[in-house]
Amino acid sequence: MYEVVYLERSSRWGEGVSVELRHLRYFAAVADTCHFGQAAATLHVAQPALSYAIRQLESELGVELFTRTTRRVALTVAGEYLQGEARRILDGVDDAMHGVRRIAEGRSGLVRVGLTGTAAFSHLPVMARAVKRELPDVALQIEADMLTPAQCDGLRAGTLDLGLLRPPAVGDDIEVRIVEQERLALVVSADHRLAVEPVVSMADLRSEPFVMYENRESAVNEAVIRSCRAAGFAPRRDHEAPGTAVLLALVTAGLGIAVVPSSVRALPLQGMVIRDLADAGTIDLALARRAADDNPVLAAVIGVVEAAFAASVLGPDVGTAT
Amino acid sequence: MYEVVYLERSSRWGEGVSVELRHLRYFAAVADTCHFGQAAATLHVAQPALSYAIRQLESELGVELFTRTTRRVALTVAGEYLQGEARRILDGVDDAMHGVRRIAEGRSGLVRVGLTGTAAFSHLPVMARAVKRELPDVALQIEADMLTPAQCDGLRAGTLDLGLLRPPAVGDDIEVRIVEQERLALVVSADHRLAVEPVVSMADLRSEPFVMYENRESAVNEAVIRSCRAAGFAPRRDHEAPGTAVLLALVTAGLGIAVVPSSVRALPLQGMVIRDLADAGTIDLALARRAADDNPVLAAVIGVVEAAFAASVLGPDVGTAT
DNA sequence: TAAAAATACTCCATAGGTATTTTAT
DNA sequence: ATAAAATACCTATGGAGTATTTTTA
């Protein structure tokens, strides 16, 4: 009768040998073949090195992983368990390595996007489709109907990574790239006299009640006021709306008219008519990002989105691309 | 304006540096503190060694994990991802190490147990409770109502790890430890004349029709026949049952009487009466295992179960413990 | 007796240490 | 000016190789 005596932990490798992936890789190879020689060959190491490493692992664990005679090597029950765990761990390491590379290459990750009211309908589909196609592992998180200042706040606070907004008035900690120059268009309710007029120009709006964004710094408001001034009048600001949805609802209800970027055409609401304005000004649409943002996925998304916007004609008469 | 130039993969560590847990441990420490000096201190290594290891990891990945100036260290997005993964991997390794040790110590694992018909009711509760209490991470998988030969087959085939069976007639590849010596008892239907007799002895069974196990090698059958022979008669073998449940059902139905180990008392069936037999023989109950089985959890379970059986009195008159 | 794992030893690659320089605030 | 990371260089541990022995089927 004899008793199996396990090597004491740290009897030979005084407390200092920590388990390394090398041990697990070696162990997995031996566990798969149950043959030190063959495993050593596939690992491109000499057999004694393998034996040594496995001994080290067993010693560190204080557990026998193989029952071996010179003719037969077999996993112990503990060894069988470790075989599964080792595989899981090694696969996990591989996955982590690939994941890191994909993130660094901008092929994976999350981009939180803020959108102006009108862009949500006209540009978001193009954007989302392009990203889905070119960067299938990139997730977009959309925050819609955000006015420019809110988007800038979001970018600065780090709750937003990308904005689709109206360019002027952003600090230089935010980098802006214009992607579209849109002509302004008229929105009236279906029963409005201008809904059937053959041609509409800014001058026709002189005495109309305007529905405008309530935010004083709204870039759309500014563009509208500029267009009105060019036509020789100041708009009658009768109603204010906090966002595009409300603005269009008020117009549809007949409370007034509105002049908005022509991308609202992508949202043909019931009872609402959109008319060209031959002499109205234009307004830019731009992508905005933190200048200091080093997330590679953001650069990748911006590249894909810019290409998609450049390639897509967003419907007839929706302004001229830059 | 200068451009960050990533070290080419394998520019300096020619294709040979594989990622090791050391790299992940170092990385995790730096990622947590965002400070090479402090991380080096907690890791008990010098700062240059840390810098070097992180560089190695970055080079192997081809990815920048930290943006560092001498005054500020910050994780890149890829680094943030790896921080999570590294933690998961390192925890996984730790768990695997503990799991292996627990298995090797017999404190964790699965034991598949085969039970004889009567033991399922009398001994299984004691057994299961003891294992649950002493070895909470050990799972028992029970296969009930198995006769001795079936259990031996199961043990040899490796579908069973432990048997609770009737000792004789097992080869020496199976190791047997007797845990109980049970007296044989009489089972009759409630309306049988012997159900109310003040004292019953073997001789009273001389002309009764017996219900016996159909398996010719049944150890219970042998013990019964031996007891009858000692009382001077051979049992009238009128009916046969494949297992204990059927056997008791037949007795209850009044098709005959049966003599069985007194542990059937743990299963007081409707319409069935159990009587002591003063002069009947005894039959052993034993734990059986593969002699070559080196699963530590099995040894642990056997230890716990034997102690539990020794400590428990399985009800009045249920035989004498060895 | 032959195949295969363990041992004995040797060596050099490299992890890690010390000293110093660079850099950014 | 100073804190902190990078660089340069050196040392020595230990991983891996070759040669040999031991073991068992």
Image (cartoon, coloured by chain):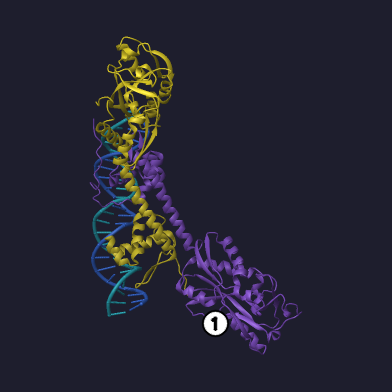
Chain colours: A yellow, B purple, C cyan, D blue
Left or right of residue B220: residue A137: left
Residue A12 seen anywhere in this rendered image of the structure: no
In this orientation, which residue lies closer to the viewer: A250 or B175? A250
Numbered disc 1: secondary structure: loop
Query: In the rendered image of this protein, does residue A72 appear above or below residue D2?
Result: below
Query: In the rendered image of this protein, does residue B150 appear above or below residue A154?
Result: below
Q: Which residue matches tag 1?
A: B217
Residue A97, image x, y percentages: 33, 48
Query: Can you name the residue that lies furthest to the bottom here?
Result: B232
Residue A154, image x, y percentages: 40, 28
Snapshot quadrant of residue B129: bottom right
Q: Mark 1 falls within which chain?
A: B
Residue A123 seen anywhere in this rendered image of the structure: yes
State the residue at coordinates (51%, 80%).
B170
Residue B278, image x, y percentages: 71, 81
State the residue at coordinates (37%, 12%).
A235
Left or right of residue A48: residue B176: right
